[in-house]
């Protein structure tokens, strides 16, 4: 069992984690016709918008209740009402994702009462779903905020679509999956003759595509019609341990069995996923994936010489840390230092002795007398990698100094191969230069 250490620091010196509202907004952006609405100051929304624009290099629809000093003292009920009415008038969203910030959570706005009062005052908007997620900045991280939003999405009542599809499978996509990862998962599930209902589906909204017209809300993602058909799914596949609570909610609401796949990279993990799809569909694994499996075996054979006994440090969100560390461990690498952002039950099952819940300063302290061959974290780790004179492999959020984050795929047989080639080439380059 991995020992989880939480340093008692009063301040993050070189921050690693991102806030819960940012994670919740990311999840909401996976729904079609969505407008995420931050209940907080304009600065909270501006930061999240810049962050997501720099990572995805796309226009990001976000809005705010624009709390001021006066409204923070007197209460934000009027700001919420005005913001929703303005959005309905100008952006015409199909759904609104309302999330709180540290400012309004600290003030203690009674969001349940405020939303109930809004519904009473505006019966004409009875058909507009308003999905609420409580996401204070001072707790958790991007991963927990994202998970909270997904739980809110699957808990909401959207009405019922009576058209049943016996081949529909709900896929709960964790925050560590990129739009390219989600696209790959949809393609795999469809190859088995199953109909994937992905929640949230970032591959439809943040995959990097040009629209014919300017869109004020998300142009793709999980549609309202799909949300109405959630009860029709025959099974739920949760990708990422953080999706377990949402899967449990679906199970309780619709009596839908589920299985959690903590990772979807590596030979064994992908084998288990395809085996489950084969069981659900009653079909054999398509020849395309049998060939990809052989290609991955060859990639492992070619690259394992460069991974053996390499010392690697990782600083990532819990789900992504879990997937990455187990894959590297299976290739013969040694994870000598690990830092993550927030608590998770999955941290106790990592292939290393200790993991620290902290920031990049904690990572630096771990590496002072223990040099490594590679650092894996987001773009904020660039300064640390230069200081340690070791290469940096960029992973997680944000990645603002590399292109193609929308299409990047690191799951499935194909994605695993890409990861091994990426990292293997870094090690190969080090050997050539020495």
Image (cartoon, grey):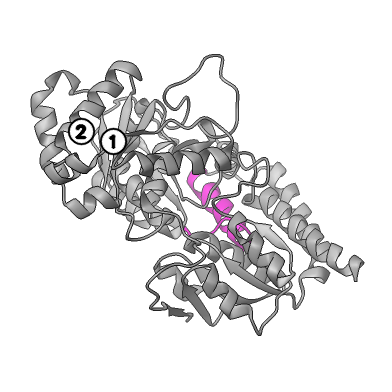
The extreme bottom residue here reads: 369
Q: How many marks?
A: 2
**Numbered mark located on residue 79 in the image:** 2
Q: Position of residue 195 (x, y in %)?
A: 48, 34
Q: Position of residue 167 (x, y in %)?
A: 45, 35
Q: Quadrant of residue 79?
A: top left
Q: Left or right: where does residue 93 sit relative to residue 337?
A: left
Q: Is 280 within the magenta?
A: yes
| Dominant SS type (magenta) | helix
**Numbered mark located on residue 403 in the image:** none
State the residue at coordinates (33%, 51%). Answer: 148
Q: Quadrant of residue 188?
A: top right
Residue wearing tag 1: 66
Q: Position of residue 314 (x, y in %)?
A: 60, 68
Q: Position of residue 88 (x, y in %)?
A: 28, 20
Q: Are marks 2 and 1 in contact (CB under 8 Å)?
A: yes
State the residue at coordinates (46%, 31%). Answer: 221
Is 37 or 181 nearer to us in this picture? Answer: 37
Q: Which residues are magenta?
A: 261-281
**SS at mark 2 in the image:** helix
Neighbourhood count class around disc 2 (C-alpha, 10 Å): few under 14, some 14–19, many 20 upward: some
């Amino acid at each position: 069992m991995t020992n989880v250490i939480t340093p008692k620091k009063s301040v993050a010196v070189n921050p690693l984690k991102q806030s819960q509202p940012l994670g919740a907004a990311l999840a909401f952006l996976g729904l079609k016709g969505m407008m995420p609405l931050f209940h907080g100051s304009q600065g909270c929304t501006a930061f999240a918008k810049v962050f997501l624009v720099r990572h995805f290099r796309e226009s990001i629809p976000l809005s705010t209740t624009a709390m001021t000093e006066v409204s923070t003292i007197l209460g934000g009920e009027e700001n919420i009402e005005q913001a929703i009415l303005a959005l309905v008038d100008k952006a015409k969203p199909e759904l609104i994702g309302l999330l709180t910030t540290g400012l309004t959570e600290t003030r203690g706005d009674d969001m349940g009462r405020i939303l109930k009062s809004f519904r009473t005052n505006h019966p004409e908007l009875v058909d507009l779903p308003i999905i609420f997620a409580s996401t204070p900045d001072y707790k958790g991280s991007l991963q927990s905020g994202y998970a909270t939003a997904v739980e809110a999405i699957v808990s909401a009542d959207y009405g019922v679509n009576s058209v049943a599809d016996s081949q529909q499978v709900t896929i709960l996509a964790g925050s560590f999956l990129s739009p390219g990862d989600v696209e790959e998962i949809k393609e795999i599930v469809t190859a088995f003759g199953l109909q994937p209902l992905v929640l949230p589906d970032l591959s439809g909204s943040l995959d990097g595509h040009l629209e014919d017209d300017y869109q004020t809300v998300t142009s793709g993602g999980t549609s309202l019609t799909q949300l109405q058909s959630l009860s029709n799914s025959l099974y739920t596949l949760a990708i990422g341990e953080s999706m377990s609570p949402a899967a449990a909610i679906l199970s309780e609401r619709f009596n839908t069995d589920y299985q959690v796949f903590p990772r979807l990279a590596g030979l064994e993990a992908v084998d288990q996923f395809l085996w489950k799809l084969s069981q659900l569909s009653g079909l054999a694994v398509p020849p395309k994936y049998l060939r990809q499996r052989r290609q991955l075996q060859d990639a492992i054979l070619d690259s394992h010489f460069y991974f053996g006994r390499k010392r690697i440090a990782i600083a990532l969100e819990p789900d992504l840390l879990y997937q990455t560390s187990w894959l590297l461990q299976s290739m013969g690498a040694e994870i000598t230092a690990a830092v993550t952002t927030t608590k998770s039950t999955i941290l106790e099952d990592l292939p290393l002795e200790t993991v620290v819940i902290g920031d990049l300063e904690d990572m630096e302290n771990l590496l002072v007398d223990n040099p490594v061959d590679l650092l894996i974290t987001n773009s904020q780790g660039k300064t640390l990698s230069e200081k340690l004179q070791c290469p940096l492999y960029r992973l997680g959020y944000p990645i603002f100094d590399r292109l193609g984050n929308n299409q990047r795929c690191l799951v499935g047989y194909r994605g695993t191969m890409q990861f091994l080639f990426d990292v293997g080439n870094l090690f190969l380059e080090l050997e050539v230069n020495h």
